[in-house]
Amino acid sequence: MLRMEAPQPAMTVAAPLAAQRCRARAWCGNAHPVPIGSDPRAYGHPPRLAIGRRTPGPRRVPPYRGAIGRECLGVGRTVEVHAPCGRGSAAGMSPSVRLQEMIRVIRSARTQCEERGVIQKECAAIRAQFRQADSVGRSHNLAKLLYVHMLGYPAHFGQMECVRLIASSRYSEKRVGYLGAMMLLDEKQDASLLITNSIKNDLSHSNQYVQSLALCTLACMGSAEMCRDLAPEIDRLLRTSNSYIKKKAALCVVHIVRKVPELGELFTTVAHSLLSEKNHGVLHGAVVLITELCERNPETLTQFRKVVPELVHIMKGLVMSSYSPEHNVAGISDPFLQVRILRLLRILGRNDVTTSDAMNDLLAQVATNTDSSKTAGSAVLYETVLTVMDIKSESGLRVLAVNILGRFLLNNDRNIRYISMKSLQKIVQTDHNAVQRHRGTIVDCLKDPDASVKRRALELSLALVSAVNIRSMMKELLLFLSSCPPELRAEAASGIFTAAERYAPSQRWHIDTILHVLTTAGGDVRDETVPNLIQLITTATELHCYTVHKLYRGLVADISQQPLVQVACWCIGEYGDLLLRGECEETEPVQVTEDDALDALETVLQSHMSSPTTRGFALTATMKLSTRITHNVDRIRSIVSIYGSCIDLELQQRAVEYNALFKKYDHMRAAVLERMPVIDRSSPGHTNGEAAVGAVREPDQTRKQPAVGTVTEEHRNQMCDLLDLLSSSDNPTESNPAKSCPEDVCPSSSSSAGEDLLDLLGGLDALPPPSLTVYEKNGVTLRLQCDRQTDTEVIITLSASNSTDSDITQFTLQAAVPKCVQLQMKAPSGDVLPALGAGQVTQIVLLKNPNKVTLRMRVRVSYCSQETSCQDTVQINSFPSVVWQ
């Protein structure tokens, strides 16, 4: 690439070595590179010497072999060079050395500081020669500067030299100049505008390799202005008969379309004509160009759907062709072109039934005839699977695609297993039954030593959990949780909680599962786990005795898992009488005394592993036991009094208030510390951030709620009591209006203050939130109900029902809102719509509208009815104004 006869220190060598040096100079003296695949004899030069990037790793000092060294690291061809005097340091290198010698000295630098010194000295010499306008060594110096740039050092002062070399008439200089332009220039540099005319002239050059240099440079760093100016020249080159230029021009057009999308129409016709070429390089460029045009313009996409038969014909020729050494890669005929064609077919067949039908047979043929034992075949099959899943393909073809991914799971290559599980996770919602067939293989991947494969296997396993396989899948997941890496425990615990809540076959199974997770990975669960479990325990009235006994044994065995200790303390405080009674039929009878229960709580209070929150739970539980035991009340009083001077303010405040209950309000202690009422999950304010899950619960969990808008007798009495309270200051002797309140409304003779309050509140009758039907198709009805919480927050409840004769499965909802509105979707109540309206699926959506803009929402409805997948999108623009104004 460079002249290699730079001045060197004289050395006395033997005659054979001198002869070798002469041969080296004769070979390397005019070694100007030519493009790969061209005939070097056309220019009278030997093949080029490629400059390689610096390889990472420890430095290796090349050995010296007398006066002649054979180590030229970073150079594509090993040549014999004349070694300088010294040890290869900066001091031993002359101001202007050959490229290979500079590379050797830089690589032999022992420290970063020494390397910087070498490069700074050489860059200074290059600047000086640039100022002298030395035309002989210009390309030589620019090549050295490009190597410096590859190492990460500044080389911007060589930009103008690139412009000068591009304008040169010599091919060797022009090639180095174009290479420098691609590396040192971009569209933001003003110097890039100076080469536009040179590129235009070279595009009309008689030599195809000069044209190739101009095309590559324009495709690499051409700006929008350059693309507009040179687009006619590129269009002319696309119509030439030279295949070498055609493929370069096609890839250059891809860059032009990305920079200036409106120029795509100029190349639509010629892109279609390129599909008739026989050269694989031209076909590859044509397919890439058509893909880019279709992605940029929907009208062009519709136009190119007509070429699907041609693409199918080309693809069949590749699949069924005989062995061709020119294009064969591991037994697959040109897999690169096959992958590109499949990707284009996926774009053309998306959301188009006719186009998809035209390629179904081809996809089945590729899926069955491609060997997956090699990486090239696996790449083609993977692209085939993505195409099948993205177009309107037949159900049998989709099952075949899932089976291919299942075979990938058995591959020894971890990368192939990873992409297989990633693809299965995308389609598990639409082809759940087909993916279920490979459940065993997916679960086995949980034991893979690779962390990324293990994470994907966990996500896919959680997605495969259903009401049918909940017990078997949960055993595998709990077994994985006990041995999974620490970074996966939080994700695994969260997924198990969600699956248990959605598909729990019974409340006891649900409680046991959560307690098992808390015992195994209690320190990695989310903060809302404790209140959710407490809420679950309160609703399972018949399991209170069983739960408190099990939690007590867990507390005595281990107090390191803080969430488990908090729930255990709460249950002992609430149901301590059941614990002391020891009449639990669900577990082995264990006699627990009052001292045993207090010892357990006192151990938690005194343990250094207990957090302030856990100590608060334990102190409250100790206080609550004072109303559930009879002989150790004084001990409880002493325990509480100790924490009246605790350094933790929360714990101190609790202790002081509890001491006040003992001293001043002892007569109220039993009433204050009575059991907590059963928490109704469906009541407002008690959802813990999740939607009520009722589709998979047991029958005893369903509760009959009063109709919206009706006023119960209790509400009427409370209303009348409030009126009486407001009017008592004026009429202290007036009787309680609740006794004389009519059946429907309170008497009109109420005080004016009460009337004003009713008018202010708009009446105490609960008005139903605004609701409307937003979707009604195929027997599926989706209703939207709005409930405004604050000035900026609105709760949207989406309720779906099914009026057909068969169940609708895999029901999912997705929502999108404008950017100025914040959206948060809660977990749905299920994914199955029972037939004949026997149940419904609800999903709560929380909207935050700080700017109070007009609400708009787009909802995507997906479900499977009678083994047919349906997907629709609904645009909702008619929100009631009361929810956003």
Image (cartoon, rainbow, N blue to C red):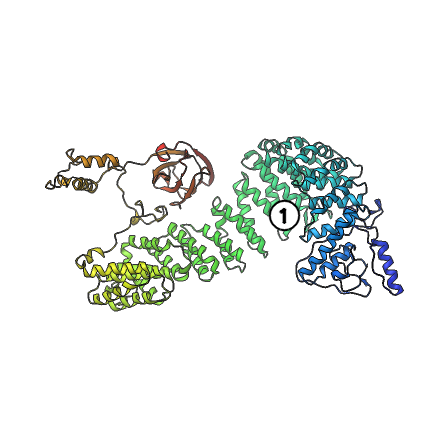
Residue designated by label 1: 370
Q: Position of residue 83 (x, y in %)?
A: 80, 61
Q: Position of residue 504 (x, y in %)?
A: 37, 52
Q: Residue at x 52, y 41 (%)?
A: 395
Say few, some or many: other residues with alpha carbon within 10 Å of mark 1 (under 14 / 14 to 19 / 20 or more).
some
Helix, strand, or loop for circle 1? loop
Q: Is residue 206 left or right of residue 598?
A: right
Query: How many labels, in total?
Result: 1
- Up-down: is 5 above or below 704? below
The extreme left residue here reads: 733
Q: Position of residue 754 (x, y in %)?
A: 19, 37
Q: Is residue 433 left or right of residue 81?
A: left
Q: Is residue 123 left or right of residue 432?
A: right
Q: Residue at x 75, y 54 (%)?
A: 76
Residue type, label 1:
Thr
Q: Image quadrant of residue 785?
A: top left
Q: Position of residue 28 (x, y in %)?
A: 83, 53
Q: Image quadrant of residue 190?
A: top right
Near-viewer residue (677 or 646): 646
Is residue 313 visible to us here? no
The C terminus lies in quadrant: top left
Q: Residue at x 80, y 37 (%)?
A: 206
Q: Image quadrant of residue 97?
A: bottom right
- Up-down: is 555 above or below 541? below
- Up-down: is 731 above or below 416? above
Near-viewer residue (731 or 95): 95
Is residue 494 visible to us here? yes
